[in-house]
Image: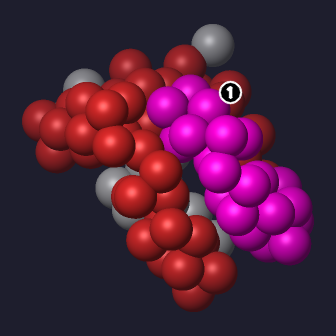
Amino acid sequence: MARTIVGWFNKQPRLLQIILLLIPGVNWIVEVLVRWSAFLSSKSLLTLLFAILVTFVGIAIGWLDCIWCLLFKHLIFARG
């Protein structure tokens, strides 16, 4: 199950990814789900730090991720 959320997000068209990251409430939910599922699949310390950070200040990081996703088609440190 952990890989399905991050995999699902990365397989979406870029336009849908950007729309999901632009809407503030949806942005936070998507960020939390993708970050924690990326951590569960990779068990990386950096992924854990980003998952914890997004859980508490996800809206601010979401705008950065929106730009990153526009450029690279995945979230920062959540390639999955």
Q: Is residue 7 visible?
A: no
Q: Residue 19 occupies which quadrant of the picture?
A: bottom right
Looking at this rendering, what residue extends furthest in the bottom direction?
Answer: 71
- Main SS of the magenta part reads helix
Q: Position of 64 compared to 15: left or right?
A: left
> Could you tell me which residue is drawn at 65 percent across and 51 percent down?
24
Type of amino acid under label 1: Thr
Q: Using the image as rendered, state which of residue 73 and residue 29 is in the foreground.
A: 29
Seen from this angle, which residue lies furthest left? Answer: 45
Name the one closer to the observer, 23 or 14.
Answer: 23
The residue beneath circle 1 is: 4
**Could you tell me which secondary element the residue under label 1 belongs to?**
helix
Q: Residues within 10 Å of mark 1 (few under 14, many from 20)?
A: some
Q: Position of residue 7 (x, y in %)?
A: 67, 41
Q: Residue at x 47, y 51 (%)?
A: 59
Asked which colour scheme the image uses, the reply is secondary structure
Up-down relation of residue 21 to residue 18 (above or below): above
| Left-right relation of 63 to 5 | left
Residue 23 forms part of the magenta stretch: yes
Q: Nearer the viewer, residue 71 or 22?
A: 22
Image point 71% across, 41% down: which residue? 26
Q: Relative to 42, is 69 on the left or the right?
A: right
- Vertical arrangement, residue 35 with respect to residue 24, above or below: above
Span highlighted in magenta in the image:
12-34
**Residue 43 visible at all:** yes
Q: In terms of depth relative to the viewer, which is nearer, 79 or 36?
A: 36
Rendered position, 2 above or below 53: above
Q: Quadrant of residue 45?
A: top left
Q: Position of residue 51 (x, y in %)?
A: 32, 34
Q: Quadrant of the N terminus?
A: top right
Q: How many marks?
A: 1
